[in-house]
Amino acid sequence: MTHGGPIEHHRSVEYRVHDAGPRPAGFTVTTSADGRTIEVTGACPSCGGGTTTTWSYGTGNGYKGVLRRQAARAPAPRGPRTVCCECGHAHANRPAEAFHLGCGACWQVDLP
């Protein structure tokens, strides 16, 4: 993982979609300096690979006048959200149509 994230201890587990439970220890939830993105970073509880999920909201482009001001005030996502492994490692039996590039594990995090 880049950006000074957690030390990665990736395990070659077979791809399997499953619920890994509530937010594992060691995950961080940060908001960008401009307030337009929230990032959840840590090590997958299933395969140990470094993973980051980013939610973007609001917009700085494409709108003028009142619409731009309304878009800029879009509320940040809050409450429980599902995060899935995005470790980027090749896991055995991962279907080609799988959306997330990880081991298939998902878990819940509470956004501030």
Image: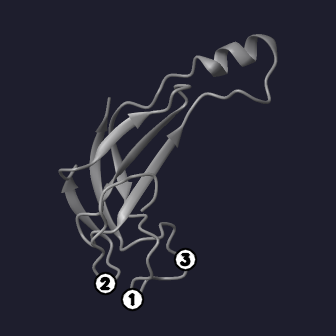
Q: Earlier in the sequence, mark 1 or mark 3?
A: 1
Q: Under tag 2, what secondary structure?
A: loop
In the image, taking residue 73 as reference, residue 39 lies left or right, namely: left
Residue type, numbered disc 1: Ala
Residue type, numbered disc 2: Ser
**Residue 97 percent coordinates (x, y):** 55, 77
Residue type, numbered disc 3: Glu
**Res 111 quadrant in image:** top left
Give the crowd class for mark 2: few <14, some 14-19, many >=20 residues within 10 Å: some
**Residue 12 percent coordinates (x, y):** 31, 84
Q: Which residue is mark 1?
A: 92
Q: Which residue is mark 2?
A: 12
Q: Under tag 1, what secondary structure?
A: loop
Q: Residue at x 65, y 15 (%)?
A: 70
Q: Which residue is mark 3?
A: 97
**Residue 9 percent coordinates (x, y):** 27, 72
